[in-house]
Image (spheres, helix red, strand yellow):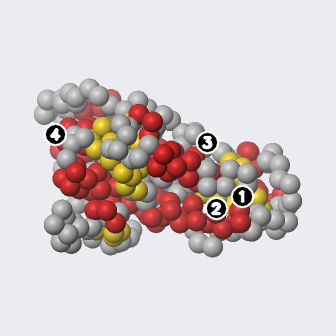
């Protein structure tokens, strides 16, 4: 299954909450239960980026500007807007001399230069795992390799990585495009990838590229991030026993969309992506004994808990956590935010979670 990036307008309207008890507890043939995937939810890079905006607001006061959505989740963006963050599409919308945060997805050198030209105080909240891919692109371009960047054209992360070496990068959107991509020198080609893709689809693309270009080089380490892989592994295990899978995450979140696809590929009879619990439809639960629940890497745990409460009203109160990995990775905040205004090291100088489930 192949998907493309989806661009959503930054949310402005307040959330309308549904009344508790909206879902009915209808009888099913067997025992109702929930398989709750772990890991799920916030990864270290997302947590770091969100904390960076919060700390910038505390340190510099509102408004603080953010280029693009800091992470691809409408709830997170709305919450930060309420605290004084202003989200813009490009840095030319930011008043000269203001503070601007670059999103977790990264930016190209052209964006960095544009911010500098406007005298902006830029805070780079790019996920360090995305930065790693940027550095790989720079290095391979310097060695005159042609870079086949597997990812979704138009996604911010892909734009940022491609912008590091625009004359050396060709974007490969899907396995099918691997069959038609043209390179100048088949003996000097390397593949890199967007960090939030389906592991299975990415490797299918790589295998099809390698069939055509046997000398294709691999990146020095896996580009798909640990959190994306871990969440896909967990939902694979959940999907085998689930009649229905609910993925919490926004439509422009690549890794959330992938989780729906993976759930269907690995045995779930139905799978839906939602932003909020109130989007769950009564008919989804008809005849369903086992509901699988997970969330994308940019989703706060509170939204998962709301889903569990909602389906609990419908009789799904027996919750079993299916844990496939532990996550304890943490990243330092951008250097500008590691100290408070007095110069003392800030207590929240790290971003990340020390739990594997997202609780």
Q: Position of residue 92 (x, y in %)?
A: 45, 36
Task: Check the picture and name the quadrant holding the C terminus.
Answer: bottom left
Whether residue 86 sits left or right of residue 3 in the image: it is: left
- Where residue 153 is drawn, which disc sits there? 3
Secondary structure at numbered mark 2? helix
The disc, 3 or 1, on the residue closer to the chain's N-terminal end is 1
The disc, 2 or 1, on the residue closer to the chain's N-terminal end is 2
In the figure, residue 35 lies in which quadrant?
bottom left
Give the distance between the C-alpha atoms of the residues marked 3 and 4, in whole angstroms: 41 Å
In the foreground, 167 or 223: 167
Q: Residue at x 26, y 26 (%)?
A: 13
The disc, 4 or 2, on the residue closer to the chain's N-terminal end is 2
Q: Which residue is mark 2?
A: 137
Give the distance between the C-alpha atoms of the residues marked 2 and 1, in whole angstroms: 7 Å
- Where residue 78 is drawn, which disc sits there? none
Give the distance between the C-alpha atoms of the residues marked 3 and 1, in whole angstroms: 14 Å
Q: Which residue is mark 1?
A: 147
Compared with 330, 180 (above or below) is above
Whether residue 137 sits left or right of residue 348 in the image: it is: right
Determine if residue 261 is in view: no
Q: Which residue is mark 4?
A: 313
In the foreground, 141 or 216: 141
Secondary structure at numbered mark 4? helix
Pick out the residue farthest to the left. Answer: 20
The disc, 3 or 4, on the residue closer to the chain's N-terminal end is 3
Camera-nearest label, 3 or 4 = 3
Camera-nearest label, 3 or 2 = 2
Compared with 10, 79 (above or below) is below
């Amino acid at each position: 299954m192949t998907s493309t990036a989806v661009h959503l307008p930054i949310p402005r309207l307040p959330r309308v909450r549904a009344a508790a008890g909206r879902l009915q507890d209808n009888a099913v043939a067997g025992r109702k239960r929930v398989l709750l995937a772990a890991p799920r939810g916030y990864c270290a890079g997302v947590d770091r980026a969100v904390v960076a905006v919060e700390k910038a607001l505390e340190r510099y006061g509102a408004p603080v500007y953010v280029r693009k959505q800091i992470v691809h989740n409408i709830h997170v963006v709305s919450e930060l807007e309420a605290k004084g963050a202003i989200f813009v599409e490009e840095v030319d919308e930011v008043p000269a001399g203001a503070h601007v945060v670059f999103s977790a997805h990264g930016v190209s050198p052209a964006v960095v230069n544009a911010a500098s030209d406007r005298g902006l105080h830029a805070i780079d909240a790019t996920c360090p795992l995305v930065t790693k891919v940027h550095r790989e692109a720079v290095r391979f371009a310097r060695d005159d390799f042609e870079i086949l960047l597997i990812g979704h054209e138009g996604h911010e992360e892909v734009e940022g990585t491609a912008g590091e070496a625009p004359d050396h990068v060709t974007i490969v959107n899907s396995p099918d495009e691997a069959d038609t991509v043209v390179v100048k020198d088949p003996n000097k080609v390397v593949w890199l990838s967007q960090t939030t893709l389906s592991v299975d689809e990415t490797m299918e693309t790589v295998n099809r590229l390698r069939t055509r270009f046997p000398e294709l080089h691999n990146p020095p380490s896996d580009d798909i991030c640990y959190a994306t892989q871990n969440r896909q592994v967990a939902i694979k295990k959940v999907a085998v026993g689930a009649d229905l899978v609910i993925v919490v995450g926004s439509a422009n979140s690549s890794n959330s969309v992938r989780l729906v696809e993976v759930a269907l590929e690995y045995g779930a009879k139905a799978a839906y992506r939602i932003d909020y619990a109130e989007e769950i439809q009564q008919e989804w639960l008809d005849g369903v004994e086992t509901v699988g629940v997970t969330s994308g890497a940019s989703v706060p745990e509170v939204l998962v808990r709301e889903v569990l409460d909602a389906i609990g009203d419908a009789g799904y109160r027996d919750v079993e956590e299916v844990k496939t990995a532990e996550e304890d990775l943490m990243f330092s905040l951008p250097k500008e935010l590691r100290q408070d205004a007095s110069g003392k090291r800030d207590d929240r100088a790290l971003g990340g979670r020390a739990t594997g489930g997202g609780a």
